[in-house]
Amino acid sequence: MKKIAIVVATLFIVSGCSMFGGQPSEEKAAAGGSPEVEAAIKEAEAAIKKADSAGGEWRDTSSKILKDAKAAAAKGDNKTALKLAKEAKFEGEMGYQQAKEQEKASPWLF
């Protein structure tokens, strides 16, 4: 229970930090910062690959979120692409963390 509370607290802290820290770069991306979007997508792909190596890739991370980020980048919607790439990176990092925390998990009632 304590580990779950720590994970939930970490999720809120990280999502809060990304919410307040991302404004200038998202506006810059909307103005045509395509290299920033490409870098964010590459970071997300690396985080997803790391999570997958530990067996912790979340269901929609690469199949939906990263795919939508690439599609938005191709259409020129850099603001949406950057937001989705950051979300995919976050899910990749959290999936890896979850897999590592739970790799020695066992039933606690037996």
Image (cartoon, grey):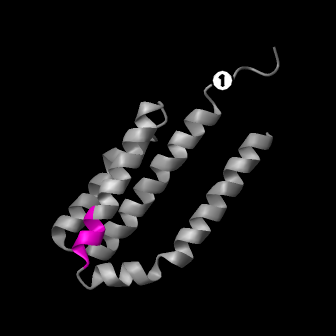
Q: Residue at x 71, y 56 (%)?
A: 9
Q: Quadrant of residue 41?
A: bottom left
Does residue 65 show up?
no
Q: Which three-letter amino acid code belongs to the residue tagged 1?
A: Lys
Q: Is residue 47 above or below residue 51?
A: below
Give coordinates of residue 17: x percent, y percent: 58, 70
Left or right position of 95 against 86: right
Give coordinates of residue 21: x percent, y percent: 52, 76
Q: Quadrant of the N terminus?
A: top right
Q: Residue at x 27, y 53 (%)?
A: 67
Residue 68 part of the magenta-drawn span: no
- Return the residue at label 1: 104
Does residue 85 show up?
yes
Q: Is residue 107 above or below residue 57?
A: above
- Secondary-structure class at tag 1: loop
Q: How many marks?
A: 1
Give coordinates of residue 110: x percent, y percent: 81, 14
Q: Which span is picked out in magenta?
A: 33-38
Q: Is residue 35 above or below residue 95?
A: below
Q: Residues within 10 Å of mark 1 (few under 14, many from 20)?
A: few
Give coordinates of residue 61: x percent, y percent: 40, 48
Q: Residue at x 44, y 59 (%)?
A: 87
Q: Nearer the viewer, residue 77 or 54?
A: 54
Q: Quadrant of residue 33?
A: bottom left
Left or right position of 29 against 108: left
